[in-house]
Amino acid sequence: MPELNLIQAINSAIREEMRRDSKVVVFGQDVGHFGGVFRATQGLQEEFGEERVFDTPLSEIGIIGTAIGMAIYGLKPVPEIQFADFIYPAFDQVVNELSKMRYRSAGCITCPMVIRTPFGGGIRGGHYHSQSPEAYFAHTAGIKVVIPSNPYDAKGLLTASLRDDNPVLFMEPKRLYRASRGEVPDKSYTIDLGTAHTIREGTDITLISYGAMVPLALRAAKQAENEYGLSMEVIDLRTLIPYDVKTVIDSVRKTGRAIVVHEAPKTCGFGAELAATISEKALVHLEAPVYRVTGFDTPFPYSHEKHYLPTTGRIIQAAQDSLSF
Amino acid sequence: MLQVLSAEGIVQNGQSIPSLAPKKILELYRLMLLNRRIDERMIKLQRQGRIAFYVGSIGEEAATIGSAAALEKTDWIVPAYRELGAALLRGYTLQELCNQLFGNSQDTFKGRQMPSHYSLPHLHYASVSSPVGTQIPHATGLALGAKLTGKKDIALVYFGDGATSTGDFHAAANFAGSLMAPVIFLCRNNQWAISVPVDRQTANPSLASKAVAYGFEGVCVDGNDALAVYNATRDAAEHARQGHGPVFIEAYTYRLTGHSTSDDPRSYRDDEEVRLWEGRDPLKRLRLYLVSEGHWNEKKDRALEAEIKDAILSAIRKAEAHGPPPIDTIFTDVFDKRPWNLKEQQAELERSLGALAIEPTA
């Protein structure tokens, strides 16, 4: 099995699906001849032609709005928003139009599509190239939110998203694009949306995370074991909407403690949703409050990026707070 | 400004009547009258508190019906919210409309949307939306979909003068020009965006001229002249279908009543202006033409009026007799399948309705 990095796995997923399904079309800014600023669509125009892989004028409203029309016509659009930080001009198209088309038409019109967008910090990108806006979309009825943390999952989840009958926002942790490598099959395969992956079994504390925070959580778990003899279970959520509530709750019932790790700001972040659900469904099993290790409720800072982003130190601190509660 | 018929229904010098059989022109007239009488009746219904809201198109029937008539049935119509006429032309029935207005158990859209918001993809008529301008890029996408798959379909999108101020309009027009999408941008310039006049939307007195900035042609047509609107749309459709790209049509018209049932236009504009435009009524104009050509007379008009009135009242009676849709329709069609949280929330609602001894409907 070839070893690919995360961006190559994404490229492979799109390529395989375009070979399988002639309805799949890819477009956005710089995705055509250039192959995307992160190279996610490299070589696709060469293989599938300018009809199916093309550059658009520079407007997020136009990219998503046009994609909606193409989906109504029966195509499977895969628009790219170059950075998640740039998606806000298209927010209305995503929230009011795309995500509500099935409901408002009572199922007469569906708009299956996959909006791909890189997100998250750790690349010295500052405020405009580092944000994690997943909570806005997780709060939006009618769109799935999927976030991979490694190349194997990226290909399987993206392929599943491309075959899903609903709109999917596929958020790619850009700092893992090249940093994360792993074995990825050549052929297509899918990972069911809505299924989390328990990547490390443990008995003392449940760490719940997604995206680029998953390898961090794993490092923290290993460090906690080595230094403090703690047994941490690590769950990679993989899909935020709909998320795998059973895996989360079963784990918390077992460990009695939970910490959520994400880069997005704390207040009303996805961790708040998880904490609330855990308290509703597993309160009597909890030995301590659910802790959140997250970005701060500030804009994303440039020079102090490493202090804004969660660290293994903060995760272990939260674990100690939980144990000493 | 392109005009075939004067306000008195007289064919203007050098103008050509569309090559439509008189029967087809009579059908346009019938639809325009039906549209007018539906609007008038539904406004009354809202005043009586029987429906919550209504948005009509009184004075603009020629702009919508004249344009929709010039398309093929598989061409996509992308509506704003004032194009019932185009839906009727495509085959949307009075009964379906009334069921939607009442949000009853027979409503195709399961009572999810406020009145006048329907989606008719089986008629190649997209989904009505309230936010202004958001539908315009969808039309560019539909047109591109046809182009990329080698089909001859085109798309026509309706919007008002206010929508030309939105980013969505700009993005859609720019995408269409750049990507050569076969789309017709049909702007019903009815001169008022609720209470704001068109000269506050833009310093440019010609909306049609906006097309120039996007690299395609814009034309201005008398929007109260069904035959002129038909001719302009037919030409634009041919242009788009032959692969020459988009066209912008400004249909110059006037909204004779309020924006919707929620405003009183007397509070923001002069009666004199309204009276001037009542003299340019699109229905009167087409009727005078048909009478002068010997295709129509008062007797036929009275019979048609009676037939339309009966049909409307009967459809309202039937719609009003049905209760609301079943309560589980709140939770379906969010996704293709209900995820766990929606199942839980439905159970929560059903439990609370049971506890309060309120019967779930149907």
Image: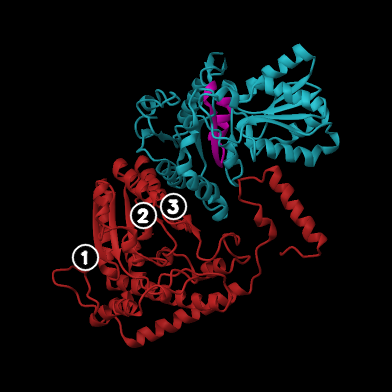
Which of the two discs, 1 and 2, labels the residue nearer the N terminus? 1
Location of residue A24 by image quarter: top left
| Residues at marks 1 and 2, CA–CA distance in whole angstroms | 24 Å
Q: Chain B is drawn in which colour?
A: red
Question: Where residue A214 sits: x, y (%)?
Answer: 64, 23
Q: Residue B165 carries which label?
A: 2
Toward which corner of the image does residue B354 lie, by quadrant? bottom right
Q: Mark 3 points at which residue?
A: B134
**Closer to us: mark 1 or mark 3?**
3
Span highlighted in magenta in the image: A154-176
> Which quadrant, please, contains the C terminus of chain B?
bottom right
**Residue at disc 3, secondary structure:** loop
The residue at which mark 1 appears reads as B2
Q: Residue B23: which disc?
A: none
Instruction: Decide: few, some or many residues near mark 1? Use Cα within 10 Å; few <14, some 14-19, many ≥20.
Output: some
Amino acid residing under circle 3: Thr
Query: Which residue is found at the position 39% from the left and 40% from the top?
Result: A59
Q: Which secondary structure lies at badge 1?
A: loop
Foreground tag (1 vs 2): 2
Q: Which chain is cyan?
A: A
Residue type of the residue flagged with mark 1: Leu
User: Of all residues shown, which one is farthest toward the bottom?
Assistant: B299
**A241 relative position to A37: left or right:** right
Q: Is mark 2 on a helix, strand or loop?
A: helix
